[in-house]
Amino acid sequence: MPNLKQSSATLGLVCGLLVVSGVARAQDAEPIILSFNLGSKLRVDDNFGLDSPSAGTATFLTHHLGFDLSTRSQNQTLDFGASADFRQGNIPGNTVSTGSDNEHIYLDYTRENANNRLAAGAFYKSSDVSSTFLLANPDLPFSSDLIVDRGTLGTYGSDVSLDLGTNAPFGVTLRGGYTKREYQNTTNASLFDSDNSSLSATGNLRFSATLTGTIEAGWNRYTAQDVEQTDRETTRFGIGLQGEINPILSFVTSISHNQINTDETVGGLRGSTKDNGWSGSFELTRQMQNGTATVDLSNSFSTNGNRVSLVFGRSLELPRGALSATLGASKGDGGTPNAIGSLEYSLETATSVFTASLSRSFQTSSDDDEYERTKAAVGYKYQINSVAGLNLSLDYAQIEGLDATTVTGATRSNLRISYDRELPADWVLSGGYEARYADSDTTNSARSNAVFLSLDKSFKYKP
């Protein structure tokens, strides 16, 4: 759970933003818009907890309630919301329990004028580990998010940024953030609590309308309750430049020096290491008649050394959709080159939308592990008539560690087919089928098949 100091800081931020927003509301007399979401879902699942073997068929109801508050004025915005699920019924086994789940609360505030901008926010999320499938979010590249286990994952944090001189020849951007991940009642050693704090300052030098330089200093601290009790502090100093060579050719380049100090406990002894290295990138973008072409050469430095990548990209604007692709290679210190790339395609007709994506990348996680990440997704929406539609989605994610002794390889996939129908008074009836699959190096594979029927309603209220 959050300690007293962290809770007080978060509470102070929330209260301060509410006071500011309340004053602004009184001054600007802008209306507040409230959006409400409520519904219930009946689900019959032959292995809801993805146990191996299955603990039995679960039959339960999930009630959802959420609201979002939004207010806008000439120079500021405030968004606040909260939601939660409540399950009741019969769920065999001890992986997932009934009661509350998927709690989420957030607060975002921005204020800007002609030359400055302030933004701040805070959030909290909680969900069952067995149902966590976060790898679809590129901002959360954690291999642990594919591991199926019992217990819950709680994530909370806050961030603030201040931009000064946004339209001046010289500007400064200050940023700070904090994120914590907490696991409760889990059994897998790869699921451990972690804290991540960061501060950065960036100076923006606008030499002309087509050329901008940057000077950056950054600090990050990562601590984890893993086996090694990792405590890592990273400082970064860098410069960058972006601009246009001609009307159809632009570039972005940067270079930074990184110093990484790590304290870890290995073999019962606490030790410290210091790593120094350079990171940098250079990207060229050429505007084409029907899209863009890019080439990106980069080197990223971490405690595992350097990883160099070269990637070529092409995007196409199609008559009824879009296509983009990248292809390249990535090589770590002492390793061999590995193929990386991505593919995204979309097609839209008068009655349907089709999307597909595929990607393969190599990354270094927060706990110093290097792994290969593969993702694939397919989506299809078909509008049967003005009130009914058919939806299909397939998501797949796989993690493989370059060092199998430190990374738990895992695979997750979800297939979902649903029929949605709009009812009077803004109600939506949905029913369908969902299949899930999970596997990892430390557990047996597990599958589940489920049918569901839900009734949901969304509406807005202006006081």
Image (tube, helix red, strand yellow):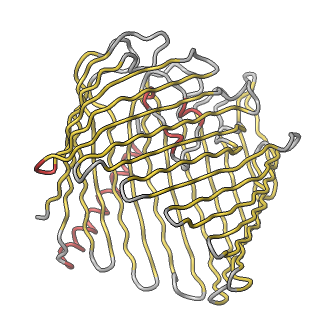
Q: Nearer the viewer, residue 366 or 361?
A: 361
Q: Image quadrant of residue 214?
A: bottom right
Task: Count the labels in the image.
Answer: 0
Looking at the rendered image, the quarter that the C terminus falls into is bottom left
User: Does residue 251 sit above or below 446 in this rendering?
Assistant: below
Q: Is residue 47 left or right of residue 282?
A: left
Q: Which residue is depicted at the point 36% across and 55% down?
A: 351
Residue 256 in sight from this viewpoint: no
Q: Residue at x 16, y 51 (%)?
A: 426
Where residue 119 sits: x, y (%)?
42, 67
Rendered image quadrant of residue 225: top right
Which quarter of the rendering shows the N terminus?
A: top left
| Residue 4 image offset from top left, x and y in percent | 39, 42
Q: Position of residue 263 (x, y in %)?
A: 71, 38
When the figure is inspected, residue 433 is found, relative to residue 14, above or below; the finding is: above
Observer-nearest residue: 19 or 36?
36
Residue 432 at x, y percent in the picture: 32, 32
Q: Is residue 6 visible?
A: yes
Residue at image position (38%, 51%) is 10
208 to the left or right of 379: right
